[in-house]
Amino acid sequence: MPEDAAADVPMVGGAPMFPDRTIVENAVNSEDHTTLVAAVKAAGLVETLSSEGPFTVFAPVNAAFDALPAGTVDTLLQPENKDQLTKVLTAHVVPGRLTAADIIRRERSSSDGFYHMTTASGDALSARVVNGGEVFIYDETGNAWQVTQSDVMQSNGVIHVIDGVLLPR
């Protein structure tokens, strides 16, 4: 890779996110997403998130998982809770490639001030833009989490780093 091209590669969790690699190929290198990667593996979603897609993934950082009630992550990672874990994880995935500009444009043209999305799990997410450009993603429980890093382009979609875990009902 030419040196000037390397400068255009975004860093997430201390790791370069190469646009010619899949979501999974890049995410496994992010120090900020080790819990998410472990959960994706436990849910058996590696193959899905390595497929052609495209996918828009709202990727919670480790601190977001740490902020859940004590024992939640350990419980979800148990084999008998795979279906529940899969539902939580797929509530972070929207089919298609949505950039921050797409989300902002759609939110601004909506009648209610939100851009509404349906996730791979069938659950609802909504996006709202505040302060002239900060994007927040709302889950079905009413929690809102900020997109802290947007438009991390992947060969099979795009990652938006968020500061919370999106929860389906």
Image: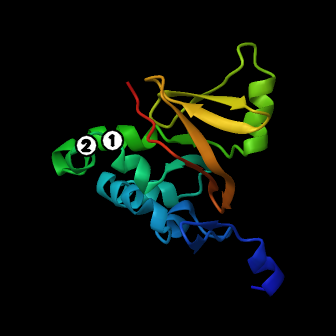
Q: List x then y, in percent, for residue 163.
A: 51, 46
Indicate the quadrant where residue 111 lies: top right
Q: List x then y, in percent, for residue 167.
A: 41, 33
Mark seen at residue 153: none
Give me the residue at 49% from left, 55% from top. 49
Give me the residue at 72% from left, 19% from top. 113
Q: List x then y, in percent, for residue 44.
A: 34, 55
Characterize the local packing of mark 1: few (<14), some (14-19) or many (20 or more) Cα atoms within 10 angstroms: few
Q: In this view, does 58 lie to the left or right of 154?
A: left
Q: Is residue 76 left or right of residue 91?
A: left
Q: Which of the pair 51/27 is nearer the observer?
A: 27
Q: Is residue 86 above or below residue 16?
A: above
Q: List x then y, in percent, for residue 61.
A: 47, 54
Q: In this view, does 152 lie to the left or right of 106?
A: left
Asked if disc 1 and disc 2 are in contact, CB closer than 8 Å, the reply is: yes
The amino acid marked with disc number 2 is Thr
Q: Name the residue under label 2.
A: 72
The amino acid marked with disc number 1 is Leu
Give the structural element (helix, strand or loop) at label 1.
Answer: loop
Indicate the quadrant where residue 108 lies: top right
Give the structural element (helix, strand or loop) at label 2.
Answer: helix
Judged from this view, the residue extending furthest toward the top is 111
Judged from this view, the residue extending furthest toward the bottom is 2
Characterize the local packing of mark 2: few (<14), some (14-19) or many (20 or more) Cα atoms within 10 angstroms: few
**CA–CA distance in space, label 1 to label 2:** 6 Å
Give me the residue at 27% from left, 48% from top. 73
Q: Is residue 109 above or below residue 70?
A: above
Looking at the rendered image, the quarter that the N terminus falls into is: bottom right
Indicate the quadrant where residue 115 lies: top right
Q: In this view, does 84 lie to the left or right of 29?
A: left
Give me the residue at 31% from left, 43% from top. 85
Mark seen at residue 68: 1
